[in-house]
Image (cartoon, rainbow, N blue to C red):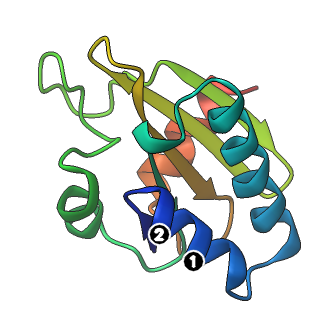
Amino acid sequence: MIDMPDLDAILVALRAPLAPDLHDLIASRLHDAFACGLADLTHILVIQPEDTEAQILDAIGFSPLVSRMDGNRLQPDWDYIERHPGWHELIYTVGDSGFAFLVFVERADGVLPELLALCDGASR
């Protein structure tokens, strides 16, 4: 898991060795955030093989496997989903400030199967 709760953490991650496709996704979203004046209101989380639901909860305070509205399991409530080569991108907006969680889910063996199934079903 790569947890980037603020702009400084995102910039540090972009200087670290990352797979080129992941680096490009993060850099592109950071560019978009700057263009919209939201760079300080963006939390990026990268979910990779062996990451657990508990770790996700610790990082962002909710599980993408549970609806934040009614608590139903396997009822996605993201605001946007997009499929990229090797990745799913989920966006969760919070409040009216423009704050958002951007969650990148690697499409790989060892990633939470329920999460991959949810993402695959929604982004076809």
Q: From where the camera sits, is residue 109 visible? A: no
Residue 104 horizontal/vertical position (percent): 58, 52
Q: Residue at x 45, y 74 (%)?
A: 1
Q: Which residue is mark 2?
A: 9
Q: Residue at x 17, y 25 (%)?
A: 72
* Mark 2 and mark 1 residues within 8 Å of each other at the beta carbon: yes
Residue 68 horizontal/vertical position (percent): 19, 26
Q: Callout 1 environment at 10 Å: few (<14), some (14 to 19), or many (20+)?
A: few
Asked which secondary structure carries label 1, the reply is helix
Is 71 in front, or is 84?
84
Q: Check disc 1 and give the amino acid type.
A: Val
Residue 61, relative to residue 53: is it above or below? Answer: above
Q: Which residue is mark 1?
A: 12
Q: Callout 2 environment at 10 Å: few (<14), some (14 to 19), or many (20+)?
A: some
* Disc 2 to disc 1, C-alpha distance: 5 Å
Residue 48 horizontal/vertical position (percent): 54, 71
Residue 16 horizontal/vertical position (percent): 67, 86
Q: Looking at the image, which residue sits at the far left? A: 71
Q: Can you say which quadrant of the picture contains the C terminus? A: top right
Q: From where the camera sits, is residue 115 visible? A: yes
Q: Residue at x 81, y 44 (%)?
A: 84
Locate residue 44 relative to residue 14 in the image: left or right: left
Q: Looking at the image, which residue sits at the far top? A: 96
Report which quarter residue 32 is drawn in: top right
Is 35 in front, or is 66?
35
